[in-house]
Amino acid sequence: MLNQPGTGDPGTEDASLLGSGDLDGDKNTPPDGGGNGGGGGGSQNGGGQNDDFPKWMAQNAGEYKTHETLKQFQTINDLSDAYLKTVKEMEELKAGKAFVPGEDATEEEKKAFLKSIGVPEDVNEYKKVDTDLPEGVQLSEEQFKGLQELALTNAWTEKQFEAFQKWYADEAKREYDSIAKHNLEEKEKIEAHFKNEWGSDYTKNIKFMEDGIKALGGKDLLEKLNKTGLGNDPKVISFLVEKGKSLKGDSLLDGDLDDKEEVPSGQIYYPSMKGL
């Protein structure tokens, strides 16, 4: 006789199939919600693969099924592309090719890259290039030091630094020659003007002009006139001539100022910077 539930006998509730609620069904069929692996397994793909990882990773073995680094590749093709790119970069690296560091590169990686392409680690490694520029047109020591700092700040290579200096020298020489040509033309014009105006007194008036320069400042005045271009101004020249005439017979002028060095005839004109 079958035991009925509720009789109080030990184990009677589990001794009959009545407790399962399934008299005729397949004994191997689990209750709803059980699934393979028991209840609560609905959030897993086969083999325990989490939905947070790409499906292709389920094919991997062991820890590679859930390796965080592999998670970034959504398909096997993505992984294949990354691998082949790495192989190519390694081959190029062996051949001496340098790679630009990414945004997440360390300071050591950035320094290594800069060194590999020829950027000096110290500002004094940038060397000055010899040029044939006239004095006053070449970079001063202070300017050159500033250029070195600029180069290092902007990661110039030594070749770039050398190339810039050569470019600057060419441009400065071209500008210098252009100014010198213009000033020579102006000198010739002003000479022609005064030769026509002074006639036979031209040489004598040039001497008076020189005396006027010496009396009013000598070499310092001459330098200022040449730098400003006023040495080609007819009014300035006429003023200096009159000043020289007014001092005629002065013992100081007879003794010659500025260590008795005579200002060369025509130097007041502004042909170039050679008279500075």
Image (cartoon, helix red, strand yellow):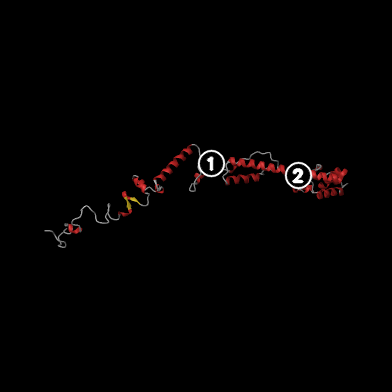
Residue to which mark 2 is pinned? 183
Numbered label attached to residue 115 = 1
Of helix, strand and loop, which one carries label 1?
helix
The x and y percentages for residue 62 are 34, 45
Question: With 199 as the anchor, is 187 left or right in this view?
Answer: left
Q: Can residue 238 be spotted in the picture? A: yes
What amino acid does circle 2 point to?
Answer: Asn
Q: Residue at x 43, y 43 (%)?
A: 81
Question: With 112 as the anchor, is 248 left or right in this view?
Answer: right
Q: Using a 10 Å C-alpha cutoff, classify the residue at mark 2 as few (fewer than 14 neighbours), some (14 to 19) or many (20 or more).
A: many
Q: Using a 10 Å C-alpha cutoff, classify the residue at mark 1 as few (fewer than 14 neighbours), some (14 to 19) or many (20 or more).
A: some
Please tell me which residue lies in front, 248 or 232.
232
Q: CA distance from mark 1 to mark 2?
A: 47 Å
Question: With 132 as the anchor, is 58 left or right in this view?
Answer: left
Residue extending furthest toward the bottom: 6
Numbered label attached to residue 41 = none
What amino acid does circle 1 point to?
Answer: Lys
The x and y percentages for residue 249 are 88, 46
Question: Is label 1 or label 2 in front?
Answer: 2
Of helix, strand and loop, which one carries label 2?
helix
Please tell me which residue lies in front, 217 or 234.
234
